[in-house]
Image (cartoon, rainbow, N blue to C red):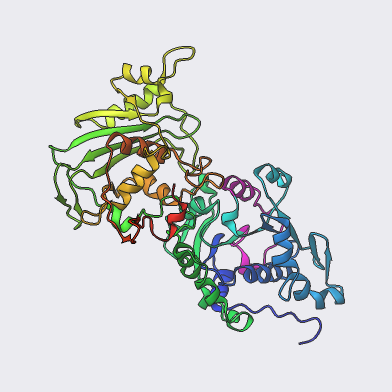
């Protein structure tokens, strides 16, 4: 290879991503799929073939950007060293300038306030490495800067720009919005034109695994072994197989779609029904309707629901479409009217709600306004964590998720309760209080579910697992992550 030639080879799966007609792509899933290499090679090829192209490559942290993309044997400096010596390319701090006017800007955006640095940018190609490290607010803002004016695209690239390529593994603060944007609504490799409120681009998820990056066998032959030794089963599954339903650090890792989600069925008339409520205006409100199994019940989908189990058969989540954790700002009376309409024909025994809705300030409380419309609440037990030998709401929910060995789970969700199924497995531990969940997360459904569980206390049967000569007994609870529990 001469000094002016570059090695710009891509493996087949990377090539599929490069050649795809989609304009908003997520590449990756499993670790080791060659995500960062794809971004560097794609940016160089596009920069050389499209004069004047403006490329913005993002990592959340500047130090990570330098380590992963600039330095090292496969970083930009090494890749472009021959061209730099020939004068075709100049690397100046956070810019890579090509002879034809194209530029690669090396960017970082640690916090949401930093997104405004790019307010005037005209981004032709947006590359975001480790997309789940970013918030949805940052992503939507940067996507809004993607535009192309006055660029003469070669025929083979027409309709493919402006373009976004994101890469990521499961996990991280942005796991849930990335999953709900690229994974849940799309089949792998499917290209779907999104409506204008979602950016109006052609969206695609391109899954990649270790085997899609054969170079890894030479560069780091022990890579897979290292992944297997991560310790957490959830993390291994997420990193090795790109499983977006596995979340490392999940507060309720007991939750399983296979175990806890059932197809809708007709609730027997003899079962007690009630509802739970967490109020929100700027943030979402959440209403859940529950049935208490009066006897063991065999569902049409083959699950056996034990007597006393809770079944969430309906929910009403007051969230703006496409904007997680953003409330509808509906008046409390209107929410009450909608509740009455949704539960028409149900015989509701009682309703439990966040005690905060009973507070009176300059007028009637939220509870008063809703009672005026015929929706009556009582104060829920708002205890979150266990203390002084008394169980809190999280342990009540966890016990129901685990159930007893002889009965199985004691709580279920209809498959139509999409927001619950979306949110429960994604909620993380609070980094400062591991016995509590992250209250900065979208936790409204969890709070309301906690109220429901506390209104129907469940006593979990425990079995002695080991007894030593001193008479000390111990029981294992919560599997490999039991150290995280209160």
Is residue 293 visible in the rendered image? The answer is yes
Above or below, 346 against 54 in this view is: above
Q: Was residue 141 drawn as part of the magenta stretch in this picture? A: yes
Q: Residue at x 71, y 75 (%)?
A: 74
Q: Residue at x 47, y 34 (%)?
A: 327
Q: Position of residue 411 (x, y in %)?
A: 28, 47
Q: Position of residue 306 (x, y in %)?
A: 19, 49
Q: Position of residue 296 (x, y in %)?
A: 15, 49
Task: State the extent of the magenta-drawn residues as a range.
Answer: 135-163
Q: Residue at x 52, y 75 (%)?
A: 210
Query: Looking at the rendering, which quadrant does residue 119 occupy?
Result: top right
Q: Position of residue 298 (x, y in %)?
A: 15, 53
Q: Quadrant of the N terminus?
A: bottom right
Residue furthest to the top:
363
Query: Looking at the rendering, which quadrant does residue 27 occupy?
Result: bottom right
Q: Foreground: 243 or 440? A: 440
Above or below, 10 against 370 in this view is: below
Is residue 331 visible in the rendered image? The answer is no
Q: Foreground: 21 or 255? A: 255
Q: Was residue 439 drawn as part of the magenta stretch in this picture? A: no
Residue furthest to the bottom:
1
Q: Is residue 205 left or right of residue 118?
A: left
């Amino acid at each position: 290879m001469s000094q002016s030639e570059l090695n710009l080879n891509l493996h087949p799966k990377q090539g599929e991503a490069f050649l795809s007609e989609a304009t908003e792509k997520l590449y990756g899933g499993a670790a080791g799929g060659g995500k960062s290499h794809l971004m560097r090679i794609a940016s160089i090829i596009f920069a050389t073939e499209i004069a004047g192209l403006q490329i913005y490559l993002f990592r959340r942290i500047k130090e990570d950007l330098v380590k992963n993309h600039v330095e090292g044997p496969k970083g930009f400096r090494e890749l472009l060293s021959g061209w730099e010596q020939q004068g075709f390319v100049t690397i100046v701090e956070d810019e890579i300038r090509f002879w034809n006017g194209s530029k690669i800007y090396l960017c970082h955006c640690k916090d949401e306030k930093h997104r405004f640095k790019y307010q005037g940018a005209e981004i032709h190609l947006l590359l975001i490495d480790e997309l789940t490290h970013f918030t949805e607010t940052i992503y939507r803002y940067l996507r809004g800067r993607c535009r192309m004016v006055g660029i003469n695209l070669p025929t083979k690239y027409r309709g493919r720009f402006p373009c976004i390529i994101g890469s990521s593994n499961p996990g991280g603060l942005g796991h849930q919005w990335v999953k709900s944007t690229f994974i849940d609504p799309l089949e792998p490799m499917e290209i779907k034109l999104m409506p204008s409120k979602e950016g109006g681009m052609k969206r695609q998820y391109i899954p990649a695994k270790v085997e899609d990056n054969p170079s890894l066998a030479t560069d780091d032959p022990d890579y897979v072994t290292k992944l297997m030794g991560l310790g957490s089963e959830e993390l291994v599954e997420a990193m090795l197989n790109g499983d977006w339903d596995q979340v490392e650090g999940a507060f309720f890792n007991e939750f399983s779609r296979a175990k806890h989600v059932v197809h809708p069925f007709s609730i027997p008339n003899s079962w007690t029904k009630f509802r739970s409520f967490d109020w929100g205006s700027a943030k979402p409100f959440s209403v859940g309707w529950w049935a208490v199994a009066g006897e063991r019940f065999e569902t049409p989908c083959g699950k056996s629901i034990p007597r006393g189990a809770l079944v969430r058969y309906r929910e009403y989540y007051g969230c703006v479409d496409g904007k997680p954790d953003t409330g509808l700002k509906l008046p409390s009376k209107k929410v009450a009217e909608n509740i009455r309409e949704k539960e028409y024909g149900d015989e509701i025994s009682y309703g439990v709600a966040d005690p905060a809705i009973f507070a009176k300030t300059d007028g009637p409380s939220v509870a008063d306004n809703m009672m005026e419309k015929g929706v009556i609440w009582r104060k829920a037990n708002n205890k979150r964590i266990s203390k002084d030998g008394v169980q809190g709401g999280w342990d009540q929910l966890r016990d129901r998720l685990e159930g007893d060995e002889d009965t199985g789970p004691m709580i279920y969700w209809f498959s139509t309760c999409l927001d619950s199924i979306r949110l429960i497995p994604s909620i993380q531990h609070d980094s400062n209080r591991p016995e509590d969940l992250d209250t900065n997360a979208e936790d409204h459904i969890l709070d309301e579910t906690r109220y429901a569980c506390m209104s129907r206390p469940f006593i979990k049967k425990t079995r002695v697992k080991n007894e030593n000569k001193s008479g000390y007994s111990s029981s294992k609870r919560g599997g490999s992550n039991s150290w995280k529990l209160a």
